[in-house]
Every structure is written in structure tokens, then in C-alpha cells.
Amino acid sequence: VAVAADVLEPLWAAHQASKMRRLAFISALLPRAAAFAPTGGVAASVRYLRAGAIASAAPDVDRYYTKEREPETRDFIMQQTMLRVKDPAASLAFYCDVLGFNLVTHREFEQWGFNVYFVAPVDPASIPSDPEERFAFCMRTPGCIELTWNYGSEGETGPVYNVGNGDATGTKDGEAVRGGFGHLGITVPDVYTACARFAELGCEFTKTPNSGGIKGLAFFKDPDGYLIEVLPQGSLVTKPVDHAGVPVEGGGYVDNSKKK
């Protein structure tokens, strides 16, 4: 693919300038990092350099807040994220009954051996009754989750799909892989109240609101093990004790960045 010089040259110049800024930034940090050796040891020096390298590699994001959308993209929406699921009945019950979403549309592709189910947090009164109108409505609805069921997976033993986050499911050597997928996320008026309800409904938590380092948010699993993050609709707010009895001060968290 040919790229015009007037397009390529500014991009290359910006890349080189960014590279030089990173090198200069890290070079400036070296003497400061060495100063940590007598008090914090080599590990402290390494952490200091790592923090500097991360800061220097982070992109300049300011323009992305204010840039005008290109005319060709102004009607684009973020419409869906697709997850493969083992058992559609279990997944629909979770996303619709536990999270409170609705089925917006679905399609059955028997000739190819799979079905798709689109769920989203919408007013059920707004969902058309005609299948074709439902599909069109779905395609205009931001933030849908497409649950894809491949026939026969519901009868398999154990987990079927790798959910990211250091999962070994589906690997040939049985070793966990560095998966790129992290989690889905919902926001709720009260994280602690919502998580108490999720717990009562039998959801498995990997982080309750007061456990871990960041308080006031939680993670739990869907039927396939995909993580769902629970965040407030505003600033993080904490309560003295969460539904699992974990106090806000503690939760088994050790701040490794402060170790010497």
C-alpha cells in the first residue's frame, strides 16, 4: 500500500521526537534513581526508573478530549462487544435477571451451527415486536453485548472459553496465557448495595468492594468466568464493611510499591 510522503513524513518525525523525549526523560532519571540505593536498595531504584519509563511512554492525550469527530464518523456508535458463551440459557439468565438487561434481538444460524443473542440495558417498551425492526433497533443501540453460542458447547465438561486474565483454558500446554481481554463493566448507584444483591444471587466475586487496593469497586464472574467490574456512577465511595464482612481498612492488600 503506497503512502504519500506528505502523510508519512510528519508521522515519522513525530515518532522520532517522541522516542528522543523518552530517552532524555529516562537519562534525567538515572542519577535520581541511584540516590535510592543507600536507603531503598536496588529494588527502589528499579521501581523509580520503571515509573519514569511508564510516564515517558504514555501518550499525550489532551487533543483526544477536544478533537472534532471526522464528518465520516459522526454517526458511528460503539454498538457491541461479542462474548462466546458455553450455555445460552445460563448466560441469558445472568445478563437479564442478575444484571437487569433485556434481550434486544437474536438470530439463529442453524446452517452454521450457532446463535447470537444481543442484550442491553434498555426500556423493554422501546424494543419493537417485529424481528426485522428489532434487529435495526439493536444496531442503533450503544453498548450491547452479543452472546454467541456454538451448538454443542453446553454439553462440554468444565470451562470452554479462555476469558483472558492469565487463563489456561484452551491452551495446548496447559499454561496460562497473557490474554488481552480484561473485563466488562457496569456502573450502579451504590456499589455496596448492588454487590450484596449479586452475592445473594450466588455470584462469585474475585474482589469485593473493600478487598484489594482500590476500595469502592468490585469484580465478579459471569457463568463463563468473564469478569464484570462494578463501579459507582460518580466518585468512588467507601463503606466501613462490605457484604462479605471485609473492613475498608485492610482487605488483605499489601502495597508492594512501598516495600523496601
Image: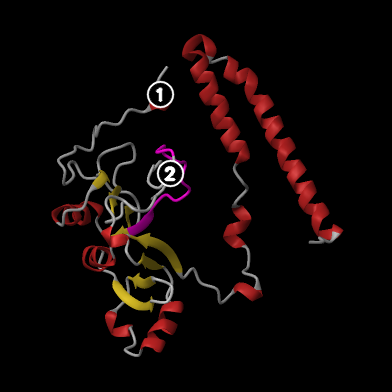
* Residue with the most extreme right position: 5
Label 2 neighbour load within 10 Å: few <14, some 14-19, many 20+? few
| Residue at horizontal 24 percent and vertical 34 percent from the top | 251
Q: Is residue 179 magenta?
A: yes
| Residue at horizontal 71 percent and vertical 42 percent from the top | 18
On the image, the x and y values in percent for residue 176 come to: 41, 39
On the image, the x and y values in percent for residue 136 come to: 44, 84
Q: Vertically, is 164 above or below 223?
A: above
Disc 2, SS: loop
Relative side of 213 to 197, left or right: right
Disc 1, SS: helix
Give the quadrant of the N terminus.
bottom right
* Residue with the most extreme bottom position: 130
Label of residue 258 in the image: 1
Majority SS type along the magenta span = loop
Q: Nearer the viewer, mark 1 or mark 2?
A: 2
Label of residue 116 in the image: none
Relative side of 6 to 130, left or right: right
Instruction: Name the amino acid, label 1.
Output: Lys
Q: As rendered, which of 199 and 28 lies closer to the eye?
A: 199
